[in-house]
Amino acid sequence: MEHTIVVFRVRRPLVCGGVISIADVEKFHSLTSGFSLSMSIMSAAMDNNVSQFERMHVPDLKTFLTKRGITCSLYRKQQLVRLCEIAVELQLEVTQTQDDYKDMDSFRRTVEVNGAKYVLPEITTVLNWKSDLRDLPLIESYDILIYLMKVGQWNESRLSNYRRDNGFNLYTSNHIHDVKLHRLINTEYFYVRAACVPETRQSENPYNPWVIVGTEGHFRSGGCTCVVDNGTCKHITALLFSLENFSSRHRDRNTEVGTDVPCTWDRARKLSEPLTINKIDIRNNPSSSLPVEPHSSHYTPSKGLKLSEHEIEKQNSSDESDGEVEIPMSMKQLADKSKDNGSNFLDFIKLYHDDDIIHQIQARTSGQAENPEWFFYRVGRITASLFHSVLHL
């Protein structure tokens, strides 16, 4: 069943509403009155905009709705298209959303200090960041759980399947790097910021997620330079799990031994360096010595030939009965014969190797290395064991 939300206009362009069916919304529209345009004019305007919205991309649809004060972060394209259509029917005007962003940004930076509300400085104005994370509060798994439930609004299903979440995958793939810390003066809070390599366009500039964490390890709020920037994006999730992992691995960072050296971020950064196919190293152990580059001089298909060609022909002749069985020729014999005939070698061997010859060679070479004939017919052929080397000549 298709659903959408009921949109209510309030003084500010923030939206509240519940989930009902599209049919109920249309019924609600039919009962409303007081529009400056008649229903026929609105229907015509509606028809002109349906195709327009269908052709728009999801970010453009969200921008259209956001400018009219409608929240739309959890809806698919068809639902967004329907919301845009409703916005046209209701003649919702473009509102100023910048003030709301400032209010939201101010709210998430507001903490309580000595019983009074205190707005922390904007993170873009902070200059003295420290790479030494020795003072980072001890962060436990339940701190992440509380944040994801309270701020991220994660439900039970998403929490139980957190390992499949995109943010957790970014964490396990080492997308988080360059983590830095800033102690906020006269408060019990820290700013923690990081760089997060984009999930797909890894050569682009990284995102910069940040969180406010208290001295007890609880997370107050967060933000990011991505388009979401509400403290619930996957980059924030990756940062939270990365901080918990770092904290659990450096529990001694405040001891006498642990403070001998700076406690900096020690997880390798996710890198994306394009390479040509011949430069890609697919070895299980890249630290081992590189293999010798293949060369045509390494191709020795006759290596291990135990019997001479004359001896094999002599052995084959013993299997014949009254000269009725024709012994398949080797590649060398075929090459000599095609040269004598002045014919193209490839065309010659294609004509020669019919189904009967192929089956004969298969039967005679059964057992491979334990069969002398296998070496005889192997000469001049590109076998599976040599195929990789031939491709890399």
Image: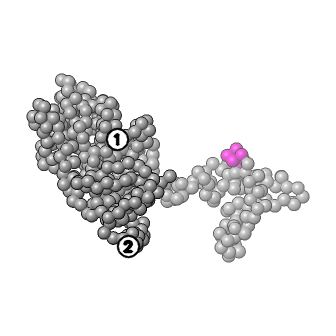
Q: On screen, 268 above or below 360?
A: above
* Residue 289 picture location, percent across and down: 41, 44
Q: On screen, 299 above or below 234?
A: below
* Residue 32 picture location, percent across and down: 37, 60
Residue 241 seen in the current view: no
* Residue 173 picture location, percent across and down: 37, 44
Q: Circle 1 is placed at which residue position? A: 153
Q: Which of pointers 1 and 2 lies earlier in the amino acid sequence?
A: 2
* Contact flag, marks 1 and 2 (Cβ < 8 Å): no
Q: In the drawing, does residue 253 fall left or right of residue 245? A: left
Q: On screen, 146 above or below 170?
A: above
The amino acid on which the numbered mark 2 sits, given as a three-letter code, is: Ile
The answer to which of 287 and 124 lies nearer the viewer is: 124
Most common SS among magenta residues: helix
Q: Which mark is residue 14?
A: none
Q: Residue at x 24, y 60 (%)?
A: 95
Q: Circle 2 is placed at which residue position? A: 41
Residue farthest top in this picture: 256
Q: Which residues are the magenta region? A: 367-372
Q: Residue at x 18, y 29 (%)?
A: 260
Q: On screen, 99 above or below 106?
A: below
Secondary structure found at label 2: helix
Residue farthest right in this picture: 322
